[in-house]
Amino acid sequence: MDETTLATGVAPAEGGEAVEGRAHVEDAGRSADGTATAGRVQPQAQPAASLTGHLRQLEAEAIFVLREVAAQFERPCLLFSGGKDSIVCAHLARKAFMPGRIPFPLLHIDTGHNFPETLAFRDRLVKELDARLLVRLVQDSIDAGRAQEEADGDPSRNRLQTVTLLDALAELRIDAAVGGARRDEEKARAKERFFSHRDAFGQWDPKNQRPELWNLFNGRKHSDEHFRVFPISNWTELDIWQYIAEQGMELPGLYFAHEREVVEREGILLAVGAFVRPRAGERVSRARVRFRTIGDMTCTGAFRSSASNVDEIIEEVAAARITERGDRADDRRSEAAMEDRKRLGYF
Amino acid sequence: MDLLRFSTAGSVDDGKSTLIGRLLYDSKAIFEDQLEAVEQASAARGAPMVDLALLTDGLRAEREQGITIDVAYRYTATPRRKFIIADTPGHIQYTRNMVTGASTAELAIILVDARKGVLTQSKRHSFIASLLQIPHIVVAVNKMDLVGYSEARYQEIVADYRAFAAKLNVRDVVYIPISALYGDNIVSQSEQMPWYRGATLLHHLETVNVGAGRNNVDFRLPIQYVIRANGSVDQDFRGFAGQIVSGRIAVGEEVAALPTGIRSRVAGIQRGEERPERASAGDAVVITLEDEIDISRGDMLVRVRNLPHSSNQIDATLCWMSEEPMKVQPQAVGHFSGQWYWLQHSTRRVRASVQELNYRIDVDTMHREDAETLHLNEIGRGQILTTEPLYFDSYQINRATGSFILIDPHTNNTVAAGMIRDRARRVSELVAKQEEGERPAVPATRSANVVWEPVAVTQPMREALNGHGAAVLWFTGLSGSGKSTVAKALEQRLYALGVRTFSLDGDNVRHGLNRDLGFDAEARAENIRRVAEVARLAFEHGNVVLCTFISPYAADREAARALAPEGSFWELYIKCDVEICKERDPKGLYERAERGEIANFTGVSAPYEEPPEPEMVLETDRHSADELAERILEALARAGIVPGAEH
């Protein structure tokens, strides 16, 4: 893919472009300091061991899918959000094409409401992967009048991402966008395919999906259509954490317990920051929390936790009685909130 | 922890969604907020109790119509095993969804409503499970609470199903009486059914043998992608990436690339950062070769002495998945006039047309019907012509290299799932040739089959009639090791037990069937290939087949193994020190070989490759033939193949 044409109008990603030299995720950024500090990368002591059992099968399946993407499409990209699922996808992509480079760029749709820690981590990871990063800003879509900010005190830009994403896919002529969605996350996703066809308007038609048999993935399409591809469809949250542990992967510190200022809103704990300011009657408190998913600061709920390393998180997840997305204010809007957003072209 | 993929099929009426909801709920795979959402939704619909089915019916349309219309995937895990559940609708108009769900499953749960017994729908699911070669079947007799937990009713249903299943090609069927609504025999043993002493459903799912459907013999690596790198470490690296779909391979072994047929050796295997010495079915690897060979996506790496079939005419079972009926085009070779499809097989995509539809199968009665074409959700058998040859195995032997999909070139939709039966050869061609007074040519690569005719009396029916199972016992070992002696001792015992046997002996077949063959490696391979095919026929006719062949090459024995279903081929290594064999030398062969009178004599001037993983090792230099025959007999009885001997 031609870097210069792709990069037109791209906001400069801080230190995000490929630099010389190769580094592996596992080797970089280890710290002797074992404490979990937000904004720092959580160090992992365990080396990457040979996988066994279900994780080995899940990894092989994901790698097979990623290679099919590289083989069947001309201009794929890997959607990168900075969340653990997309970090795992990037890690798998590196493994799929070793010792070569990942043959497609990472694409980040930046809402502008990210945790600063997410962006710092993203830029480091891209360097270590020797990958190419493209960034598109939701703010640009708003400035161009293509998207309208919600009229709210702390507007969620979750819906607006779709506009920027579809614009970016069209501009970059992306024919397959790889994402880290999992079928266990939400009930509408349970019926998602590995190769999910999108029409010329980026829409998903859940009632008219192509049957997906054996591991024969049909990536044929008309020129104005594209695919969303989900290599980790069959993974659960617990699989992700077990994999992270076994591979000794680095993650943003946000996933580990740390102290921060939070405010409780509609039963969800939000991190106080530039995009979330306490409203009248809300009380700011300091709490030891961590995040199970990382999205925008405006809608990603923190929860009280003392799990400060991967093993403790695995224990916590195994015992958890609430789904990960249960903390996402954006899904709570209606019973079929996720399905509605997906139909319109959401991730 | 390992992984089991299973499928369920059914409609709201038979309680399938409730069963899955129950499995998730009882194994604690349901979260509080999901349960809360379901409680709210149940209340909103005025349901009297929490409807666990709502947990699994994802899409809005389904919730509104109260039916499951697509394949949905569910996940749960116990400390022993992770489960991927393909949850599919059961109505006839969703046959394609059932086929989709079954395509990746290793186990199928067939639901039977205890009040209604074995209905059409259960039969349909079973037929699809057998068609897709799902190795394990669980017949869950549900709603036992509504028949008063009656053992008699349960036994009646089991007997009905058994009678029906005899017509199917299924190997492992387990019956469990349950109540999904109340959780009886799902996770814990039911107090209502003390008469049932078998495993609970979850326990069975946790312990059933996984990997039974995997072919560990025939090495096949369809190339997905060629990885090139020229970094400082890997100068001009060129590796072939793909997932090994069957068999195994090790560094240093000889492979051939298809379609070119060029041979090389494996220089290295990579799996991520790892550089393993060997890799096997399921592994996603990058392989480098010792020689520079032109290989690209769609090619296949195989072992030199274990080749797939190659043909551009195939005989296949098709399940039609599109609203647009199948286009049949009886046309001359290589001339397509728009009525064609893309055929995707492993990592290869070629143009194809359906030349002939032999018949349609009524999925409810399994009867064959004449038909012009196939419509949505119909299953049939057809002859397909492709523009380039495919490299395949029959679906029965290898799910990965025996399956394909058809894609409509205009809509790009996936319109059919296909399972390869064999190379196609239309009867008309054969008949025309014979009329000209010519015998049909028999190509050297593989015998030219006429359309494979399904038998009227199946192997399970024969086994039921015989009162014992069928198996292939392959005695391998040096000349003079005692293969025939042990086999004869065993055969006499089997005869006394009333077990039907069929024996094939190395010396005897060379008097007739194989008298045209010599003893070099190629001829030995052909010798074993023919014998293995004969053994298969005898096996399929319900016999315990005893084959006594030196069969010195592991690859030949593996090829023979590949012809029989998993678990029914027993490699019995008759082990004996070569010096003792020479002493015995019943036919004076060693003496002659050592004098140089016999070329390629195993153990003297030709190698014997010891079986790496035989089912049994029988040491004739340490035990008598009678003792060893007893041991085999006991093992056969334990495996349920023959009735237990009375002592």
Image: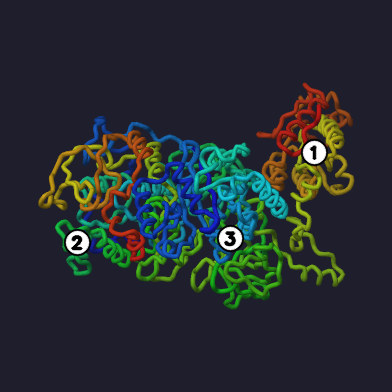
Eyeballing the image, is B515 above or below B46? above
Point out the tag, 1 or 3, that comes first from the N-terminus.
Answer: 3
Residue B60, image x, y percentages? 40, 63
Q: Residue at 57%, 77% (x, y): give it.
A: B338
Q: Residue at 17%, 44% (x, y): give it.
A: A262
Instruction: Depth check: give the residue in front, A160 or B618.
Output: A160
Q: Residue at 39%, 69% (x, y): give it.
A: A199
* Amino acid at pointer 3: Phe
Would you call the spot at circle 1 few (<14 residues within 10 Å), some (14-19), or many (20 or more)?
many
Residue A225, by quadrant, is bottom left
Location of the N terminus of chain A by quadrant is bottom left
Judging by the rendered image, the residue that carries numbered circle 1 is B549
What numbered label is drawn on residue A139?
2
Instruction: Depth check: give the residue in front, B158 or A334.
Output: B158
* Amino acid at pointer 1: Phe
Residue A32, by quadrant, is top left
Which structural element holds mark 2? helix
Residue B612, image x, y percentages? 66, 34
Which structural element holds mark 3? strand
Residue B146, image x, y percentages? 56, 50
Judging by the rendered image, the residue that carries numbered circle 3 is B404
Q: Are marks 3 and 2 on the same chain?
A: no
Residue B370, image x, y percentages? 71, 72
